[in-house]
């Protein structure tokens, strides 16, 4: 195919994919199947790989992320990002309109654009000639962090605009995480033994600051656009700007309306106060903007906010009750979660007796005392939370809530990992709650999915000292089960059959079932793909682990320390001997074969890995190890004390000599 037609095909594919993306993510009306879409994307990826000269940072193939940002650069906003004045009542809005009319020297009714106030993180996007070039967080309003690489992974941010867009302009919007996506993310975290995130807003903001953009791509973020900024833009009305932005390809929700007067604003507020629970994302109010842009200019700004806009904040659904007690839950990974026990109270139609306190820092921040009257709110979270204390109602003397220093179950002293908010019980092999919790996790639906065996039965078996680790399940005998309370012939048989059948569960499920901290379902699958057997995984070095897509330092460290514990090694050996699947059925490891056809010489002593590990790593990625340097060698991987003759030879043949760090870089 000639270059000319390749260029055309690439351009056509990009346009097609952009259009389908828009239909899917913004209009919610796709016209092709996911499969057909993937085919288009794959074809484009292939062409781009074969023709690197046509690389475009705004190609739809770049959405999957991959770029790593170690430090987000702080950059100036060309137009400052203001905050908004708040209002909470009709009276305040009436006063606001009076001030506007006075400044406009007119008592004529004012038309407004009413929009939802999305509860997320605000961002400012720059477009030049229709291309997305930069995205900054709001920061302090004058300077924000450059999070362009991460923003590119968000499908509702167009990389290439269409129609008659201004040459250069900026668009403002809010990045939000829909409630369903937030809850799903938290369920995964809890299943992986991690502390759940607090709320969708903070999670959206935090996600924008993740270093690895491919992790951002995995999170269900949305961008809502609501304003533009630029020099001498030809528009007359805010509502017109919204419509135009929609035409250019931005995600402008159709909840925005233009109303002719303040009564229209009040109706809009009343409507959304009642219906906001039906939105798939959180809003904390509505934003009212003077629609006429000339009038906006007349009104101008105060030091902090535009005079032509105001937010109307909804009251969070909040109740008020007494904190009776704080109890502590131990998770199967030993994570300790404080739970507030409340005098029961009705909130959004459900009776609430408990609220999450998240961690020790949260208790400290609220300065909680037992018996305090507390405010309880329900946000996007599954469990309600305490948002404040009514300290003037405090009786004296008061008992400050002191976070426990020992595990409520096994009484071992609690530990805290540097940089994490959660406390842990470190007695993983002796703490009954953790022991039972781990087995309950092992048998759960997403792991071994053992039919005929539930969480309560595990507790029963543990109480009768029949099981302590998942491996013990595989040695259970009919005679020892039938004598237990609540166990009849049929249930014992079902249990034993379920246990036997679980030996067929694939490796990824077994691995997830082990309950290694941070190894959730997805991570387990990735690990199985990269290391086809438990033996390979157990001997994998830190570098080999982090070379796997989506496996970061924290996960790698957790895996390594898991396998360092002798009890865990014994557990694995036993599971193996009972015939569980500890190898991927496919066999061959699925590493990208970057090094195919390349010859490596490995020489010297290395700091971070053994020489064997280095060789294994090269081979996993398709490379070949050769012993002597020749003109056919592609790389020499050198450690300390590399043979001098090898070095001379390598230099003679101009063969690159790299160290172990450079090798890991090549791998990733
Ligand atoms: P505040 O943080 O209370 O000062 O409110 C100002 C913030 O509201 C802005 O920085 C935006 O992030 C956010 N916001 C959400 N939705 C809108 C909207 N429709 N128009 C303007 N700002 C909005
Ligand atoms: Zn404990």
Image (cartoon, rainbow, N blue to C red):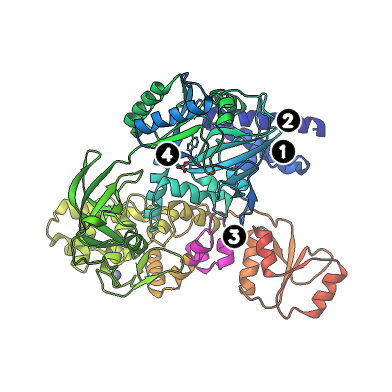
Q: Which residue is mark 2?
A: 9
Question: Could you tell me which quadrant the N terminus lies in?
Answer: top right
Q: Quadrant of residue 407?
A: bottom left
Q: Which mark is residue 86?
A: 4
Q: Which mark is residue 47?
A: 1
Q: Nearer the viewer, residue 106 or 27?
A: 106
Disc 4 residue lies near ligand 1 with CB under 8 A: yes
Residue 455 placement (x, y as % from top left): 24, 55
Q: Quadrant of residue 323?
A: bottom left
Q: Secondary structure at mark 4?
A: strand
Mark before the other along the chain sequence, 1 or 2: 2
* Residue shown at the point (35%, 31%) measured from the top left: 91
Residue 11 placement (x, y as % from top left): 72, 31
* Residue shown at the point (53%, 63%) measured from the top left: 553
Q: Secondary structure at mark 2?
A: helix
Q: Which mark is residue 401?
A: none
Viewer-side label of 2, 4: 4
Q: Nearer the viewer, residue 10 or 290?
A: 290
- Quick one: label 3, few (<14), some, or many (20+) residues within 10 Å? many
Cα separation between marks 4 and 1: 52 Å
Cα separation between marks 4 and 3: 48 Å
Residue 477 placement (x, y as % from top left): 22, 63
* Residue shown at the point (71%, 79%) measured from the top left: 640
Mark before the other along the chain sequence, 3 or 2: 2
Mark before the other along the chain sequence, 4 or 3: 4
């Amino acid at each position: 195919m000639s270059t000319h037609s390749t260029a055309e095909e690439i351009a056509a594919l990009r346009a097609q994919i952009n259009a389908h993306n828009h239909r899917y993510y913004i209009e919610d009306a796709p016209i092709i199947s996911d499969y057909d879409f993937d085919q288009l994307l794959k074809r484009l990826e292939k062409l781009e790989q074969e023709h690197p000269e046509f690389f475009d940072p705004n190609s739809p193939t770049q959405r999957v992320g991959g770029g790593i940002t170690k430090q987000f650069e702080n950059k100036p906003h060309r137009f400052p990002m203001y905050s908004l004045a708040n209002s909470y009542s009709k009276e305040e809005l009436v006063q606001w309109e009076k001030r506007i009319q006075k400044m406009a020297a007119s008592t004529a009714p004012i038309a407004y654009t009413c929009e939802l106030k999305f509860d997320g993180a605000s961002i400012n996007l720059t477009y030049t000639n229709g291309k997305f070039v930069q995205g900054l967080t709001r920061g302090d309003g004058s300077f924000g962090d450059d999070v362009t690489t991460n923003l590119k992974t968000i499908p509702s941010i167009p990389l290439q605009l269409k129609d008659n867009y201004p040459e250069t302009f900026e668009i403002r919007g809010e990045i939000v995480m829909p409630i369903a996506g937030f809850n799903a993310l938290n369920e995964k975290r809890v299943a992986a033994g991690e502390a759940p995130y607090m709320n969708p807003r903070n999670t959206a903001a935090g996600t924008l600051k993740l270093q690895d953009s491919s992790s951002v791509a995995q999170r269900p973020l949305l961008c809502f656009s609501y304003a533009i900024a630029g020099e001498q833009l030809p528009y007359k009305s805010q509502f017109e700007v919204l419509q135009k932005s929609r035409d250019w390809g931005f995600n402008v929700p159709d909840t925005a309306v233009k109303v002719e007067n303040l009564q229209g604003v009040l109706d809009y507020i009343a409507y959304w106060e009642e219906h906001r629970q039906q939105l798939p994302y959180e809003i904390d109010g509505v934003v009212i903007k003077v629609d006429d842009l000339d009038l906006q200019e007349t009104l101008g700004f105060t030091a902090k906010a535009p005079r032509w806009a105001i937010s109307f904040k909804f009251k969070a659904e909040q109740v008020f009750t007494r904190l009776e007690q704080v109890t502590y839950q131990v998770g199967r990974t030993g994570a300790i979660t404080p739970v507030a026990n409340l005098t029961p109270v009705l909130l959004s139609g459900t009776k609430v007796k408990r609220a999450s306190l998240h961690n020790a820092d949260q208790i400290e921040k609220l300065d909680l005392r037992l018996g305090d009257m507390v405010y309880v709110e329900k946000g996007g979270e599954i469990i309600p939370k305490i948002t404040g204390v009514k300290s003037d109602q405090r009786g004296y003397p008061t008992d400050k809530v002191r976070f426990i220093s020992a595990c409520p179950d096994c009484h071992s002293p609690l530990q805290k990992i540097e940089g994490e908010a959660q406390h842990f019980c470190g007695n993983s092999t002796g703490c009954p709650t953790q022991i039972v919790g781990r087995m309950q996790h092992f048998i759960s639906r997403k792991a071994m999915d053992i039919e005929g065996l539930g969480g309560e039965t595990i507790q029963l078996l543990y109480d009768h000292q029949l099981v302590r680790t998942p491996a013990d399940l595989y040695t259970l005998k009919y005679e020892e089960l039938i004598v237990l309370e609540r166990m009849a012939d049929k249930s014992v048989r079902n249990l034993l059959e379920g246990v036997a059948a679980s030996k067929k569960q694939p490796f990824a499920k077994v691995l997830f079932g082990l309950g290694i901290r941070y190894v959730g379902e997805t991570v387990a699958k990735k690990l199985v793909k990269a290391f086809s057997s438990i033996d390979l995984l157990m001997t994998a070095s830190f570098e080999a682990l982090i070379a796997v897509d989506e496996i970061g330092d924290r996960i790698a460290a957790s895996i390594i320390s898991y396998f360092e514990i002798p009890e865990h090694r014994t557990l694995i050996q036993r599971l193996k001997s009972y015939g569980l699947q500890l190898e991927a059925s496919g066999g061959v490891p699925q590493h990208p074969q970057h090094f195919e056809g390349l010859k490596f010489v490995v020489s010297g002593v290395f700091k971070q890995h053994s020489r064997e590990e280095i060789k294994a790593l090269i081979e996993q990625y398709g490379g070949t190890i050769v012993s002597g340097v020749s003109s056919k060698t592609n790389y020499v991987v050198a450690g300390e004390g590399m043979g001098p003759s090898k070095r001379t030879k390598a230099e003679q043949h101009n063969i690159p000599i790299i160290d172990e760090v450079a090798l890991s870089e090549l791998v990733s």
